[in-house]
Image (cartoon, rainbow, N blue to C red):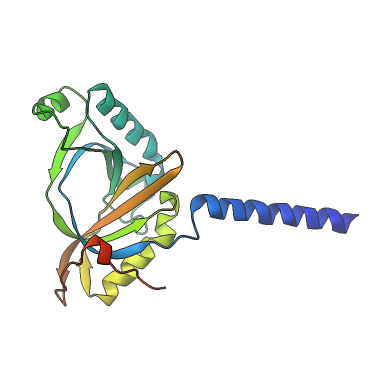
Amino acid sequence: MIKTIFLVFVAMIVTFAIAVYVHLGAYKVPKVGMKMAPAMTLLYTTHVGPYNEVAPLMDKVQQWATEHNLTCEKTFGEYLDNPETTDQRRLQSRVGCVVDSRFAPKDLDKIVATGPYKIERRLPGRYLWASFDGSPSIGPFKVYPRMRKYARVHHLKTAVASLEVYTVQGSQSMTTDYYIAIQSAADAAPVPSAKKSSTAKQ
């Protein structure tokens, strides 16, 4: 009897673990390469503290944008400090949404000036890039190690800050694009197109 109960308990744990594994998309492999990031108009607020606390702030910025007729289909988080070397309470980030420039009103700056948020127009740039269809919560374990390895292999010196742009596809699917600015590259390799970006191997 006890053995049967134990086996049932173990089976439940295994089933739960598999369900979480699938839900988070931990089985998916991120694409990693170099890319010219497009110009972006960022509507944001600042945050100091653990990075896992920023999601509600993103929602508030996006809601404000919607209320002011600004099209923000993508959200973002820009994480300025290394969480491995900086106290969690002092981590700095900027979070908000990416304003679709195709539909941005001419008086965008005036609209933003009336609210509690800031705006920055980010120029195109050369970045270490990754794309991942799994949950952003496992990015530190699935994505960033591959990006660091790619940087080592290609002799890239990169910035500390990372920009994560979140695109919701459907009701439960999300793609995250990761951008880390390239400060220098020893081999000065050309930046491939997104379609030709390579996938770093384990």
Q: Position of residue 136 (x, y in %)?
A: 41, 50
Q: Looking at the picture, does residue 159 appear above or below residue 90?
A: below
Residue at image coords 37%, 42%: 168
The number of discs equals 0
Q: Position of residue 115 (x, y in %)?
A: 20, 24
As drawn, the residue found furthest toward the left would be: 106
Quadrant of the drawing holding the N terminus: bottom right
Q: Is residue 95 visible?
A: yes
Q: Nearer the viewer, residue 117 or 25?
A: 25
**On the picture, is 24 further left or further right than 179?**
right
Q: Looking at the picture, does residue 167 appear above or below residue 139?
A: above
Q: Quadrant of residue 32?
A: bottom left
Q: Nearer the viewer, residue 162 or 75?
A: 75
As drawn, the residue found furthest toward the right would be: 1
Q: Position of residue 52 (x, y in %)?
A: 41, 44
**On the picture, is 188 further left or further right than 63?**
left
Q: Is residue 50 visible?
A: no
Residue at image coords 44%, 38%: 171
Q: Quadrant of residue 153?
A: bottom left
Q: Quadrant of residue 141?
A: bottom left
Residue at image coords 50%, 60%: 27
**On the picture, is 186 further left or further right than 50?**
left
Q: Nearer the viewer, residue 67 or 78?
A: 67
Q: Looking at the picture, does residue 107 appear above or below residue 82?
A: above
Quadrant of the drawing holding the C terminus: bottom left
Residue at image coords 24%, 75%: 154
